[in-house]
Image (cartoon, grey):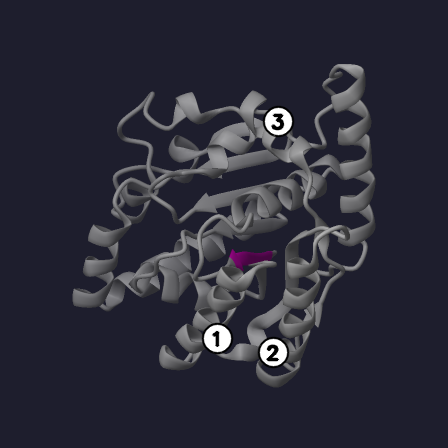
Amino acid sequence: MSVVSTFCKKGGVGKSTFIGFLAHYYASLGKKVLIISADDQNSIFKIFGVDEKIFDVNDNYLEFWLAGHAELGDILIEARENLYLIKTLNTDKLSMKLTLERNQEKVIKRLISECNTYFDYIFVDFPPSSNRLTEVLLEMSDHILIVVGLDSLGLGGFFNTIQYFIDNDIDLSRIKYIIPNGYSKNRRAPKISLDKLQEQAKEFTKDAIVLPALQEKSIIKNLQAEGISVFDKTTLDRYDQNAKNLLNDDLLELFKLINVD
C-alpha cells in the first residue's frame, strides 16, 4: 500500500481536482483506493458529486475513527466503484490533540497501516493551510506531489511550500513530482512562470520530477459543476464530450509518467 499526498501552500491551484482524477484513474484500473480529506471543507467530495454526504450523518468523520468511536467501515463513503472517501470535521481540534497527546500520532499511524488490508492506495487531500495533522500525514506519505499554479501567486505558493517543509523538518526528498497547472500557450505569463518553476525545482527539489504542464481547460469547471469525474462514462453534449475526451487523453499521458507504487 502506498500513501500519496498532494500539497501546496496556496489555494485554488487544483490539488483536490488532480488527486481526485488520479485516484479515480487507479480505481478504474481495479485498484482499491481511499481518499482521506484533511480539509474541513471536504472539497474532494464535490469532485465526485457526493457533497450531500458531507453532512448527511454526523458521526462518520475521521475524528470518530481516530478516537475509537467508530470502525473504518463506519466512516467510509463510496464515491465510485473501488473508490472511497473519508471526511473530516475539525482538523484544528484534532491537531491540538496531536500536539498535546503525542501518543495520538501512533494511533494515526497504526490505523492507517491497518488500511493495508483493504486498500492498494491511500490518497490524502490537504487544504493550503497547515497544522500538526498536516505534518503527521506528510511524514507518513510515501509520495508527495506538489501542484503549482502557473502565475506569480502560484510560484509564491511553491516557495512557501518548500519553506514549510524546511521549517518542519519534513524531508524534501519525499517530494516525488511537481505538477505545473494552468498552462496556456497563448499567454505569456504561464510560460514565464513555468520557466521559473523549473529553475526553482532544480535548486530546492533536486530529486523531484517536474511533469509536463497541465493545460488550462474550462471543461474541468463544467465537470465539477455537475459532479462528474473525467473518468466517468457519462455522456455529455457534443462540445463538452469532445473537451472531456481531450482532457481524459491528456491525463492518461501524464499519469503514465507517475509511479506511486
Q: Is residue 3 magenta?
A: yes
Q: Position of residue 106 (x, y in %)?
A: 33, 64
Depth order, front residue of 171/122: 171
Q: Is residue 136 magenta?
A: no
Q: Position of residue 205 (x, y in %)?
A: 60, 79
Give the magenta-colored segment's residue range.
2-6
Q: Secondary structure at mark 1?
A: helix
Residue for point 59% across, 47% down: 19
Picture quarter with the C terminus:
bottom right
- 2 vs 1, front mark: 2
Residue under label 3, please give it: 222
> Viewed as shown, does residue 22 lie left or right of 113?
right
Residue under label 2, please give it: 200
Residue 261 visible in the shown view: no
Mark 3 belongs to which amino acid? Asn
Residue 116 visible in the shown view: yes
- 3 vs 1, front mark: 3
On screen, residue 67 above or below 234? below
Depth order, front residue of 171/199: 199
Tell me the CA gap for discs 2 and 1: 10 Å
Residue under label 1, please give it: 162
Mark 1 belongs to which amino acid? Ile
Tell me the CA gap for discs 3 and 2: 33 Å
Which quarter of the figure has residue 170?
bottom left
Q: Position of residue 18 (x, y in %)?
A: 61, 47
